[in-house]
């Protein structure tokens, strides 16, 4: 009998954190789970960690780094749970995380809920222990298509303590209904492999919403995440990561933004795009290849956009609005 929840961890040189994240996955209680590690050609001891769990963790080993999105797609293909939990290697789940979200999405009033976000706290120390600072209570979008982790960096006390709808779930511990992932699957996978890493969770959130799937924030499900990619740390991040971050901010809009949204937000969007381009021409020249990649792949990207639009038309008008708020509102942050 297939498990209820498939927990997928993607690693790239994460041997130090994997015993904690995989241990929290294997230790889930109250629901039948399977755990799989997809390794992107790690050069450290990441591939040796599953042996610590006596067969409870399966592994898919790639010979090259295919990126987070493609590796997550490989994990989805290799698993069978009704739900998929995308877990970062630097994220630790509380023991009832998966059971709490599975029970909520099994409820009669959640048939159109395609994903769920737990209450993510910033992790501290080697043990990924909880802090009193929020990391994410779900993804929110601004009117111009920018996205943020709601509550990130705020004190956790007294904030975001009620269940409510959000635009999407953070990929650090994203909980998805498999049927929703299959409905959103495109030629580049459930997660768009073109993103490689960063923003792929926001893209999937936007696509699921356009297809009529809701996302719930369920605060009773708690996890702890060590946030590595923050704007103030950008200069300390790798050149490859920054390049994909630049590329993906445009790819996100190419995939999902409607023509009317693009026209309505063209002034603030163009202003911000010019700032990004200026930075790439001056202080972050290593990110300039992002623009070349977008140009070389323009025909294929436009074809993929048409593919996404066709899926939306086929499913019909969603019963709830697009995740972008009306122009003039900038989300709930």
Image (cartoon, grey):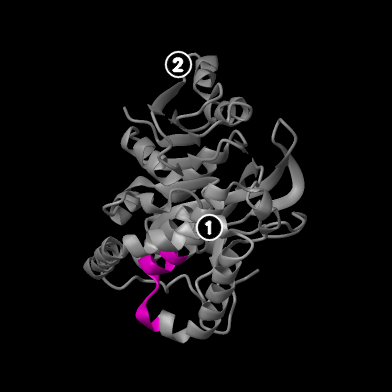
The quarter of the displayed image where residue 15 is located: top right
In percent of width and height, residue 185 lies at 30, 52
Identify the residue at image location x=52%, y=63%: 165
In the depicted structure, whether residue 122 falls above or below residue 320: above
The reply to whether the magenta stretch includes residue 131 is no
> Count of labels shown?
2
The residue carrying mark 1 is: 287
The quarter of the displayed image where residue 330 is located: bottom right
Quick one: 10 or 301, which is closer to the camera? 301
* Quadrant (top left/top right/bottom left/bottom right) for the N terminus: top left
Mark 1 crowdedness (10 Å alpha carbons): few <14, some 14-19, many ≥20 = many
Q: Is residue 152 left or right of residue 264?
A: right
In percent of width and height, residue 234 lies at 65, 54
Q: Earlier in the sequence, mark 2 or mark 1?
A: 2
- Secondary structure found at label 1: helix
What residue range appears in magenta? 250-260
The residue carrying mark 2 is: 55
In the depicted structure, whether residue 260 falls above or below residue 69: below
Q: Is residue 226 left or right of residue 167?
A: right
Mark 2 crowdedness (10 Å alpha carbons): few <14, some 14-19, many ≥20 = few
Q: In this rendering, does residue 73 appear at all?
A: yes
In percent of width and height, residue 306 lies at 25, 67
Identify the residue at image location x=48%, y=83%: 266
Q: Is residue 95 left or right of residue 295?
A: right
In the depicted structure, whether residue 291 falls above or below residue 122: below
Mark 2 or 1: in front is 1
- Secondary structure found at label 2: loop
* Quadrant (top left/top right/bottom left/bottom right) for the C terminus: bottom right
Identify the residue at image location x=43%, y=59%: 203
The reply to whether the magenta stretch includes residue 253 is yes
The Cα atoms of the two marked residues, 2 and 1, are separated by: 41 Å
């Amino acid at each position: 009998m297939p498990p209820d929840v498939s927990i997928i961890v993607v690693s790239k040189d994460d041997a130090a954190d994997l015993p904690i994240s995989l241990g929290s996955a294997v230790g889930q209680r109250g629901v039948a789970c399977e755990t799989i590690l997809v390794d992107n050609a790690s050069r450290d001891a990441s591939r040796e960690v599953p042996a610590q769990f006596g067969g409870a963790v399966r592994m898919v080993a790639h010979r090259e780094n295919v990126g987070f999105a493609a590796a997550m797609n490989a994990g989805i293909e290799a698993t069978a749970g009704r739900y998929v939990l995308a877990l970062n290697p630097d994220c630790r789940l509380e023991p009832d995380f998966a059971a709490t979200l599975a029970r909520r999405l099994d409820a009669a009033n959640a048939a159109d809920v395609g994903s769920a976000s737990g209450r993510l706290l910033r992790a501290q120390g080697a043990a990924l222990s909880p802090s009193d600072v929020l990391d994410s209570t779900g993804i929110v979008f601004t009117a111009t298509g920018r996205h943020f982790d709601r509550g990130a960096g705020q004190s956790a006390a007294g904030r975001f303590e009620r269940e409510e709808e959000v635009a999407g779930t953070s990929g650090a511990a994203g909980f998805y209904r498999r049927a929703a992932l299959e409905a959103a699957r495109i030629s580049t996978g459930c997660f768009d492999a073109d993103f490689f890493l960063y923003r792929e969770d926001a893209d999937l959130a936007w696509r699921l919403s356009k297809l009529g799937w809701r996302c719930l924030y369920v605060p009773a499900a708690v996890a702890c995440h060590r946030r590595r990619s923050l704007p103030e740390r950008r200069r300390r991040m790798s050149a490859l990561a920054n390049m994909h971050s630049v590329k993906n901010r445009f790819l996100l809009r190419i995939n999902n933004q409607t023509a009317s949204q693009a026209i309505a937000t063209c002034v603030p969007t163009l202003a911000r795009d010019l700032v990004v381009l200026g930075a790439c021409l001056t202080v972050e020249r290593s990110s300039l290849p992002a623009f070349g990649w977008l140009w070389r792949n323009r025909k294929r990207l436009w074809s993929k956009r048409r593919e996404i639009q066709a899926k939306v038309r086929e499913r019909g008008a969603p019963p709830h609005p697009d995740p972008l708020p009306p122009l003039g509102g900038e989300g709930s942050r």
